[in-house]
Image: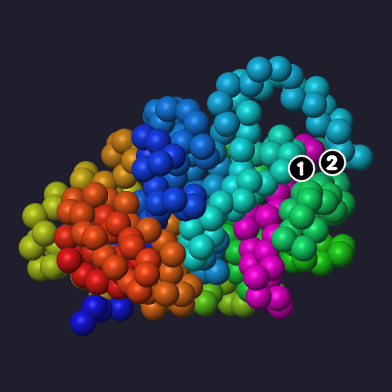
Amino acid sequence: MASASPSWVILGSVPRVSAADADLPQGADLSLALPAPPRVAVLTIPPRIFPGRTTSRSFPSVLAADASGLLLLHADQGPAKGPTVIDLPSRREFLWLPTVAGYFLLDAKSASALPLPNPEYVMHPGHLGLIASPADAGHYMVAELQMILGGDRADLLCFSSEAGEWVTKDVRYPLPSRPLSPNGVVSHSGMLWWVDLSWCLLTCDPFADAPVLRVVPLPEGKALKSKEAWGLLDKYRCVAVSGGKLRFVDMYRNLNSAGSVQISVWTLVDPDSTEWTLEYEATFKEIWDDASYKATGLPRKIPVLALVHPTNPDVVYFFLDEHLFGVDVRARKVVEREIYELVQPAREHVTTRSVHAWQLPQALCSGNSTVYCSLIVRTFLLVTGNIVFLCNIVRDQRCMMCCLIF
């Protein structure tokens, strides 16, 4: 009897692009195998969604993975053949851009893709977030916070499933004149949280008619100077939801009183608070000295932060060389280890942005799904009623269509 699918997966941010549209099952805009952590799940999309060639500088990327089964994908549509004209009430621009922007809402439950209209309206994908409505099942919103440096107003650019078009909401911008690092956007407690790993979080309810931005500073002593460690912090810090609460994980220049490098995990007391509680700290020496780490054969080397377990905040995952491994930091014990493969980036460039901790909707956990397996190792012809499926699956992974394990 087939075992249940995992309740969550580690999703690689960069999808594989199939050689041709016909390589996916007819009518499917994506395929997805869902191996249990710490193996990495890889999304496959057709070239009609990303028509370019995937390189280290040009690739599609999943910006957000929601527990509703929705994925927010950034996929440029090839070289621009002319200028980009933006004509919004609060923003009029004439730009020459190298590529045509593209953003898609992927529904893993139906294997479908919805292109968002007017993708040129988006200023920076690092400030673009996705949230499912807590009040209306099936309703969602994509929102980007657009700031003007030095101003006290900002635009919240919103695309909702109800409106079906971009709407701009004027908001008061509560921060002083300093660039907000585009370290991603987190959905939590019915709000979006714009993350600057060097400074603070900004949060609001994007469904509100008049959203109010609120500042949540990082824990005391964790704020850095403007642009300090830009391009580096997402290797050693992250903000993530785990166990239903917002967590801040810090390894950057984080030393204990004896000068040993340590990892610290903080918890935001509640979504309406600005107070963080230190959950636990552990030095890497303590982790390296444990028998569980020694048994892995891994070197005593500072790893790169990958993600936090979405339901157990004690477990943090790291990249080290070709390995992705999980550590119960409170217990100082390695609990999982696997050799990982990503489409991009190369191993020397991995960060917390390279993977997503994706909690799966019940439809995918139960196997009642139209997500198609795409990693072809062995081919099986399955007949279910009057419908014939060609099932492509790798050993020990579960086909989400036929509910079998091979």
Instruction: Give above or below for 102 relative to 360.
Output: above
- Residue at (82%, 62%) from the top-left corner? 211
Residue 108 horizontal side relative to residue 144, left or right:
left
Figure quadrant of residue 188: bottom right
Mark 2 crowdedness (10 Å alpha carbons): few <14, some 14-19, many ≥20: few
Query: From this viewpoint, which residue is outermost toward the right?
Result: 89
- The residue nearer to you, when weighing 87 against 240, is 87
Q: Residue 55 has which mark?
A: none
Q: Residue at x 63, y 33 (%)?
A: 101
Residue beneath disc 2: 151
Indicate the amino acid at tag 1: Met
Helix, strand or loop under label 1: strand
Q: Quadrant of the N terminus?
A: bottom left
Residue 384: x %, y % from top left: 33, 72
The quadrant holding residue 41 is bottom left
Q: Which residue is mark 1?
A: 147
Q: Residues within 10 Å of mark 1 (few under 14, many from 20)?
A: some
Element carrying mark 2: loop
Q: Mark 1–mark 2 contact, CB under 8 Å?
A: yes
Which of 69/91 is in front?
A: 69
User: Residue at horizontal 25%, vertical 79%?
Assistant: 3
Whether the magenta-drawn stretch holds residue 140 is answered as yes
**Relative image position of residue 57 (x, y in whole percent):** 44, 27
Instruction: Find the residue positioned furthest to the bottom.
Output: 1
Amino acid type, residue under disc 2 in the picture: Gly
Q: Rounded to the nearest whole Å, what is the CA distance between mark 1 and mark 2?
A: 8 Å
Magenta stretch? 129-149
Q: In terms of image quadrants, where is residue 321?
A: top left
Q: Residue at x 35, y 51 (%)?
A: 42
Q: Residue furthest front?
A: 386
